């Protein structure tokens, strides 16, 4: 029977909420942006028949509450949270789909927690450290600029500049025809605020050992959305990752958020690559 089990796990300085759904081999999904455990529900619908899917609220989002929310977070902490979550569930390496920030977390996992994930599908990681120094500095300043816009002008203006940075076209965004968009609830608004204020800072202050990615035991599969324009930040990071690890850049349906806009086709492509 396809049922969802929600559980809390105590980790250093926080409580982490996660869900497990489906039957079959384990698969972890680490979501992008403000996405909590429920943001991937449409994708999980198409995976749960043959995978036991783990989703979670990233530290600072929804039910995953830091002991001190004002303290912020680092990507190393996010990766440690995921490592502890997986250790709670299994002794074996687990494949992981990381989307955007989730992919950046997966890169940290691969380096700092070897043997925890077997395959990382790294869909458009927001990891400026993958890029040449001048590009890296440009995009780090871009993230800080978005933070200033969020503080000054609010969420609507922030959406606009994030979409520009990541190559998302909100006006012309396509999606699978039978999909019901998730509403912008007060909780999602709060999650976006934490994402922009704290996770952006974590990206700018990232400490990832990029060179170490070439020697990790994890199979890294760099990926990008077919609709993501060439040259934008997230696709450039995915392409740089592909060059670094000597892998082909794989494409997925949709754009930066193809996992939520094209869940059926995205699930089929994910199975192919796993």
Image (cartoon, rainbow, N blue to C red):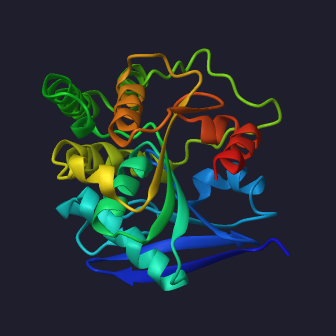
Name the residue located 27 percent from the left edge and 75 percent from the top edge. Answer: 67
9 lies above or below 75: below
Name the residue located 58 percent from the left edge and 21 percent from the top edge. Answer: 227
56 lies above or below 260: below
Q: Is residue 63 visible?
A: no
Position of the N terminus by quadrant: bottom right
Is residue 28 found left or right of 234 in the rendered image?
right
Is residue 167 found left or right of 79 in the rendered image?
right
105 lies above or below 249: below
Q: Is residue 53 visible?
A: yes
Estimate the x, y position of residue 100 in percent, counting from the top left.
43, 42
Question: In the orientation shown, which residue stands out farthest toward the right?
Answer: 1
Quadrant hosting residue 73: bottom left
Name the residue located 51 percent from the left edge and 22 percent from the top edge. Answer: 228
Name the residue located 56 percent from the left edge and 42 percent from the top edge. Answer: 184
Estimate the x, y position of residue 153 in percent, counting from the top left.
29, 27
Is residue 262 found left or right of 251 in the rendered image?
right
Estimate the x, y position of residue 270 in percent, counting from the top left.
66, 47
Report the label total: 0
Estimate the x, y position of residue 207 in percent, counting from the top left.
17, 52
264 lies above or below 111: above
Front-lying residue, 216 or 13:
216
Is residue 96 found left or right of 158 in the rendered image?
right
């Amino acid at each position: 029977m396809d049922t969802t089990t929600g559980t809390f796990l105590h980790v250093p300085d926080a409580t982490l909420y996660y869900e497990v759904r489906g039957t079959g081999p384990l698969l972890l999904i680490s979501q992008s942006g403000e996405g909590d455990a429920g943001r991937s529900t449409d994708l999980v619908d198409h995976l749960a028949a043959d995978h036991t899917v783990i989703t979670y609220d990233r530290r600072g989002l929804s039910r995953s509450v830091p002991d001190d929310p004002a303290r912020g977070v680092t990507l190393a902490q996010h990766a440690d949270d995921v490592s502890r979550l997986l250790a709670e569930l299994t002794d074996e390496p687990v494949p992981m789909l990381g989307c955007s920030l989730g992919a950046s977390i997966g890169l940290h996992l691969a380096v700092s927690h070897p043997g925890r994930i077997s395959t990382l599908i790294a869909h458009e990681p927001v990891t400026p450290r993958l890029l040449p120094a001048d590009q890296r500095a440009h995009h780090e300043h871009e993230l800080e600029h978005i933070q200033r816009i969020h503080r000054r002008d609010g969420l609507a203006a922030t959406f606009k500049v994030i979409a520009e940075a990541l190559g998302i076209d909100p006006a012309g965004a396509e999606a699978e025809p039978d999909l019901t968009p998730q509403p912008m609830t007060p909780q999602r608004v709060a999650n976006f605020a934490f994402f922009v204020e704290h996770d952006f800072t974590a990206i700018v202050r990232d400490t990832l050992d990029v060179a170490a990615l070439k020697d990790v035991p994890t199979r890294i599969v760099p990926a990008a959305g077919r609709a993501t324009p060439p040259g934008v930040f997230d696709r450039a990071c995915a392409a740089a990752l592909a060059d670094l690890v000597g892998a082909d850049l794989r494409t997925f349906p949709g754009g930066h958020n193809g996992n939520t806009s094209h869940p059926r086709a995205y699930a089929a492509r994910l199975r192919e690559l796993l």
